[in-house]
Image: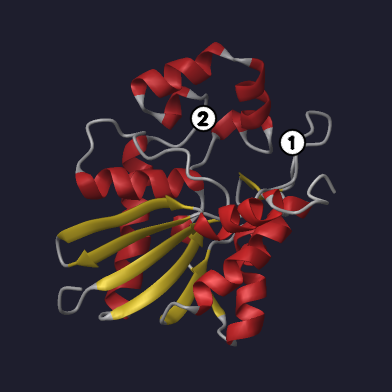
Amino acid sequence: MPRGATRLLLIRHGESAAADPAAPFPLVDGHGDPPLHAEGRHQAERLVPRLEDEPIAAVYVTTLQRTRQTIAPYLARSGLEPRVEADLREVHLGEWEGGEYRVRVASGDPLVAQMIEQQRWDVIPGAEPYERFDARLRAGVGRIVAAHPDETVAVVTHGGVIGHLLASAVGAANRFAFIGADNASISELVIAGDRQIVRRFNDVGHLRFETSALLGRTDSHR
């Protein structure tokens, strides 16, 4: 890496609990806060051997429980204590918080297509404007980078955050170019001053390995 650079392993949280229109997720500072689904907990376990090979100096999570739960198995093995960076929590979805966003996407709400076309979350009523989201992500990443020169840091965060950071790093004309990182995937961003280098996006090798191994088993239907 460039001298003084910080290597960020951007980990999307594992799969979270299914949305239920009749029982919205509880809110934390206005953000929906579901726990991990059973599959998400399994994904969290699969992260451990992958991360153990990395020289991780610190682990950051957000204020939302699914990020802490995702990294909990690794923390138990490594002995590291998580640090909270609240500014890297997910984009605020206004009136579609608490699981409503997922319900609207599944139902084909026309505002979803409009949001993608305009590449702005705030097409959703009350959602966070691009400029405000961008400012807080820059602030959160800036604090981490300042604290960890020449180090590798794991940051467990959210799909919208990862998408925004990588699109900004490469100056993508499409602000949503990197939206859609899989649950428990790893993306990698190196930051050295004003220079940003995207090294990988949506790495799920630690998840696919298990799937490939199961295909060769006679009891794979189980």
Q: Note whether 25 is above or below 29 in the view shown.
A: above
Q: Which mark is residue 19?
A: 1
Q: Note whether 72 is above or below 27 in the view shown.
A: below
Judged left or right of residue 56, residue 215 is right
Q: Secondary structure at mark 1?
A: loop
Q: Which amino acid lies under the numbered mark 2 shown in the image of this protein?
A: Gly
Q: Nearer the viewer, residue 219 or 98?
A: 219
Q: Secondary structure at mark 2?
A: loop
Q: Nearer the viewer, residue 104 or 124?
A: 104
In the image, what residue occupies the spot 47% across and 78% down? 53
Q: Note whether 193 is above or below 88 in the view shown.
A: below
The residue carrying mark 2 is 126
Separation of residues labelled 2 and 1 (CA atoms):
20 Å
Q: Label 2 neighbourhood size at 10 Å, few (<14), some (14-19), many (20+)?
A: some
Residue 220 pos. (x, y %): 78, 49
Residue 81 pos. (x, y %): 57, 82
In the image, what residue occupies the spot 22% across and 31% down? 173
Q: Which amino acid lies under the numbered mark 1 shown in the image of this protein?
A: Ala
Q: Label 1 neighbourhood size at 10 Å, few (<14), some (14-19), many (20+)?
A: some
Between discs 2 and 1, the one toward the N terminus: 1
Judged left or right of residue 204, residue 43 is right
Question: Residue 143 lies in what quarter of the image?
Answer: bottom left
Q: Nearer the viewer, residue 111 or 152?
A: 152
Q: Nearer the viewer, residue 185 or 91?
A: 185
Q: Note whether 113 is above or below 181 in the view shown.
A: above
Mark 2 vs mark 1: give the one in front: 1
Q: How is the image coloured?
A: secondary structure
Residue 77 pos. (x, y %): 63, 83
Q: CB of mark 2 within 8 Å of CB of mark 1?
A: no
